Amino acid sequence: MANGVYEMMRGLWQTFRSAWTKPVTIQYPEVKRQVSKRYRGRHALKRYANGLEKCIGCSLCAAACPADAIFVEASEQTDENRYSPGERYASTYEINYLRCIFCGLCEDACPTEAIVLEDNYELSFETRESAIYTKDMLLDAVSAPNQPTPRKVKPGSFNRSVPEMKDPVD
Ligand code: SF4
Ligand code: SF4
């Protein structure tokens, strides 16, 4: 009997104590939780500052993916119709989010830092087909005043597929 009363008082004390602490729940989706700097969420295909696509369709990300979640198809391009620097660009780029385990190996393998796992954790789908994200869904929007890709550029302006890059800092 005494033990039961003690346990009840302990439970009431916990309830009373919690009533004065800051709630851990947040009002999602109006309020979004801040994720850590190294969080691996939905991928994004990045662009250079000039608006050209960083992806050159080399498929190294697909080769590195342990879940076989990435499909890339590369095509030739010309200065009349340019998507990215270099000879080729990704004409098809797809990620199957039913397979992806968010390991980040694709990001590590990419020679141009084109594919990046960002902080977007809002991934939901109702069918198998809608779990496959296409290039249009993954590619960053072009920022003003840049023109969208493909675009016509001065002949010979872009002849290097992989830019010189610094070592990562963290
Ligand atoms: S995060 Fe990992 S599993 Fe997902 S696409 Fe990249 S390499 Fe594949
Ligand atoms: S995302 Fe990177 S590794 Fe993958 S195809 Fe494009 S350039 Fe190559």
Image: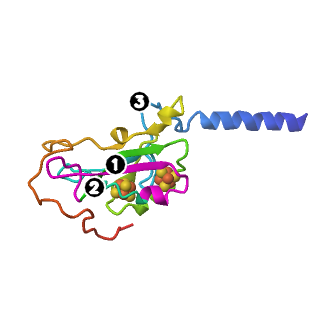
Vertically, is 130 above or below 100? Answer: above
Q: Residues within 10 Å of mark 3 (few under 14, many from 20)?
A: few
Q: Compare residues 169 and 43 and report the one nearer the observer.
A: 43
Comes first in the chain, label 2 or label 3? 3
* Residue that badge 2 annotates: 88
Comes first in the chain, label 3 or label 1? 3
Frontmost of labels 2 and 3 is 2
Tell me which corner region of the image, top left, top right, bottom left or bottom right, holds residue 4.
top right
Residue depicted at x 88% and y 36%: 2
Residue depicted at x 35% and y 68%: 169
* Residue type at the position of mark 1: Leu
* Residue that badge 3 annotates: 30
Frontmost of labels 3 and 1 is 1
x then y, percent, for residue 67 = 55, 52
x then y, percent, for residue 24 = 53, 39
The answer to whether 72 appears left or right of 68 in the picture is left
Q: CA distance from mark 2 to mark 3?
A: 41 Å
x then y, percent, for residue 44 = 36, 47
SS label for mark 2: strand
Q: Which quarter shows the N terminus? A: top right
Q: Which residues are magenta?
A: 61-86
Q: What mark, if any, has residue 45 been given in the picture? A: 1
Disc 1 beta carbon < 8 A from ligand 2?
Answer: yes
User: Can residue 14 be seen at all in this image of the molecule?
Assistant: yes
Q: CA distance from mark 3 to mark 1?
A: 26 Å
Residue 65 is a magenta residue: yes
SS label for mark 3: loop
Comes first in the chain, label 2 or label 1? 1
* Residue type at the position of mark 3: Glu
The answer to whether 73 appears left or right of 88 in the picture is right
